[in-house]
Every structure is written in structure tokens, then in C-alpha cells.
Amino acid sequence: MVEAIMLWNEPNNLSHWDFNLDPQWRKFADMTILAAQAIRKVNPELRIVLGGVSPIDPKFMQLMKSYGVLDTVDTIAVHGFPLDWNHWSIHEWPRKLDEIRVITDKPIWVSEAGVSSFGAEEVQVFGLKRTAELLLPVAERIHWYSLFDLPAAWTATTRHKEAEGSSYYRHYYMGLIREDGSPKPSADCFPNGLGICQWFHFQDPRLDTGIDWLRRLKIKHLRTGLSWADSFRPDAQKWFDYQMHALDEFAVTLTLCFTPEHLGEVNHHTSPPRSPADFADFATWAVSRYAAGSIPQVKPSAELPAVICA
């Protein structure tokens, strides 16, 4: 069940939105407003979430308010990683949410909060427990990032890759489950009440294993996404149908983001689209298909990886 649609991901982060091409985020605002309006026409009851901001920046949120973006969404989302990338203490989590509450009375979700086990798995255990203690009393929804470690052969979605040093490699150790499929100590103490953020990539071979782990951890709320760019791959709809039907037992926050290269101002997934209406069209399609009634059921086929179809 799709409980919410999230419009974009970390729009104030250069790894997800090229603000050199949109220095005042006016294009992002126009795109988001058009997409929200389109979604309301399909399903006026569906919760719309502004893509989680990282860093947590009150000035960016004030800018979105001035453009009217906050009037078109139901919920504000934030991301925080104080033990890995942010320049504030983990104990400041409640204060960071209060900084946003000064600007808006909309509900605030923490759609990504996580700790890397890059340095020590014991640090991740501490971070998980402390994050839950601090956030469960003050946030309606918290999605822990993430379920799986990123496979070593994959590329993390950052701007400068390995040139970022250890900051880059921390991306590979955010999961509760190691790449070899074994659980970390953090999986054994996962707190009740937290959800999970796990993006399943196009034809992701981890989907079935992921569902098994979500059940074992008793997860109710899952944040994942559909890549707008992936929607132009061959058999994209078949994969999207398969993924969304498989995840239907969870309350899903479905993130829509990543610009198709041929529709961007430049050929990159972080680019503003040449026409903001194109993203609204994708949002309309996604909501019509996956959040306006029953989800199409797709049987496994030989065109999907065997591990997914098992």
C-alpha cells in the first residue's frame, strides 16, 4: 500500500539536484508544485511529502515557503547523519526538527536517519539506539537508512565519488545487513517503531531477500522509490509493477526522482528538466498506477533476473 508520495530526494544537495543550474531553486519549486497539483487530481487523499532535505536547512525551507511549495504538500521530510556527514551532534536531533517547526506547522518526517558501520559496527548500534530514543517521541515517521549495505561493485550516488575520501566509502556501510547477507549487530537490536528506507534499484536482485528481512524485522513503514530516469529503460513498467506488487504489504512512501538525461537541461540525473510538466506527467502515471487502487500483479518472467523470480 502506498501511503505517501515523496517528491524528489535531497533537493538541496548537489548530488541529487544541480543547483548550479537552478541557483535559487525556482525551477525545482515550479516542478514540485506542478507535480503536487497533478497528484491531487488523481488521488486527493494521498499524502504528499516534500523530498527529504539534507542538510537540514531552515533557509532552504523558508525559500520553499516563499515559493508556495509548502502550501502544496502535506508533510516536510528531513535527513540527518550526525555521526557520519553532518556537523552537529546526534543529541541535537530534536533541536534540528524544531528549527524547521519555526517555519511550518506541517508534520515533519525523518525520511532518512542512519549511521555507517565503516569505522566500527558498535558505533552503528549506539547510533541506532540513540536515534530511536531521540526521534520516536517527536517525529511521526522515521525511516532508518538503510536495510542493506551497498554492494562494493556498485556506485554510490554522490557528486565526486572516490575523491571524497572516507566520506564516500561510508555510503557502503549504512545497512543493517552486510553485502554477504549476514546481519550486523544493529539488526539484532532494531527498535520497534522505526521504518526502513531502502531504494531497490532497477531489477535489483536483493528484492526478495529484502522483503524477507523486512518481515523478520517487523517493519511496517518502508520508504523506497521509482526512478523517473529508469522509466525509459526497456521493460521498465514490468519491473515497476513487479516491485510495487511485491511491496504491497508494507506502508510505502514512494519517492519519485532522477531526471532522464534526454529530458534534462543537461544530460545528468541531477539536472532540472527542460519542462517541469514532464515530471508532473511521470507523477501522474506513477500515482494512477500504484496509488489509486489495486496494483497490477506481474508474474515472474524469464526477462527478470532468476534470483528475483525465485
Image: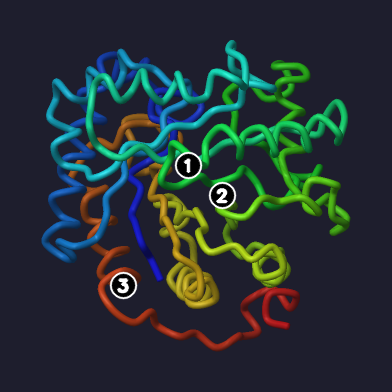
Which disc number belongs to residue 197? Answer: 2
From the top left corner, tell me how far across and down residue 99 is, in percent: 36, 18
Tally of numbered discs: 3
Residue at 87 percent of width and 30 percent of height: 120
Compared with residue 147, is residue 78 higher up or lower down, i.e. above or below?
above
Q: Which residue is mark 1?
A: 111
Residue at 57 percent of width and 60 percent of height: 202
From the top left corner, tell me how far across and down residue 235 is, in percent: 49, 71
Give the Cα separation between the discs numbered 2 and 3: 22 Å
Query: Which badge, 1 or 3, comes first in the chain's sequence?
Result: 1
Please tell me how crowded label 3 is: few (under 14), some (14-19), or many (20+) other residues with Cα within 10 Å. some
Lateral position of residue 82 relative to residue 247, left or right: right
Which disc number belongs to residue 252? Answer: none
From the top left corner, tell me how far across and down residue 262 is, in percent: 37, 43
Give the Cα separation between the discs numbered 1 and 3: 23 Å
The amino acid type of the residue labelled 2 equals: Cys
Please tell me whether mark 1 or mark 3 is closer to you in this view.
Answer: 1
Residue at 64 percent of width and 66 percent of height: 218
Q: Which residue is mark 3?
A: 289
The amino acid type of the residue labelled 1 equals: Ser
Lateral position of residue 250 relative to residue 69, left or right: right
